[in-house]
Amino acid sequence: MLGHFLRCHICSLSSVRLCQSVSMSSEPLCEVSKKLLDLEQRSVTKFLTKECKKPKEILERMGAVYGESAPSYYKVKFWSKQFK
């Protein structure tokens, strides 16, 4: 499947390679979609930090929702420090 060009399921750009590491499904993500996912996860981190949740708790919740697409612990910790 790698090497095939498909249509991105978020922004509908054509000629996008299938991204196995970031995709929450078998559908492809382009660079724009990856940035949108990153922005969404950062927003979730900001919201939960404002509710006084610790990075470990935030990561557990995000892991349950995003699965393999969840950010790393260090990224959540970095974001969380910025929002305190």
Image: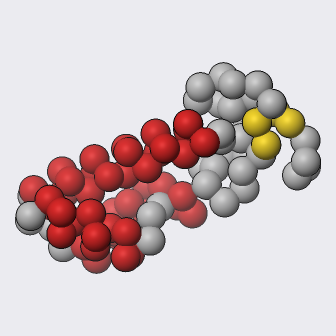
Residue 66 horizontal side relative to residue 42, left or right? right
In the picture shown, does residue 57 fall above or below 39? below
Residue 75 horizontal side relative to residue 43, left or right? right
Residue 13 horizontal side relative to residue 42, left or right? right
Q: Quadrant of the C terminus?
A: bottom left
Give the x, y percent position of residue 13. 69, 25
Give the x, y percent position of residue 32. 55, 36
Give the x, y percent position of residue 47. 18, 51
Q: Please name the residue shown 38% across and 60% down the image.
A: 62
In the picture shown, does residue 43 fall above or below 75? above
Judging depth in this view, the residue of 30 and 21 nearest the camera is 30
Colour scheme employed for the rendering of this structure: secondary structure
Give the x, y percent position of residue 64. 43, 61
Judging depth in this view, the residue of 28 and 81 nearest the camera is 81
Q: Please name the residue shown 63% across and 49% down the image.
A: 23
Residue 57 appearing in the image = no
Judging depth in this view, the residue of 70 and 82 nearest the camera is 82
Q: Please name the residue shown 34% across and 63% down the image.
A: 61
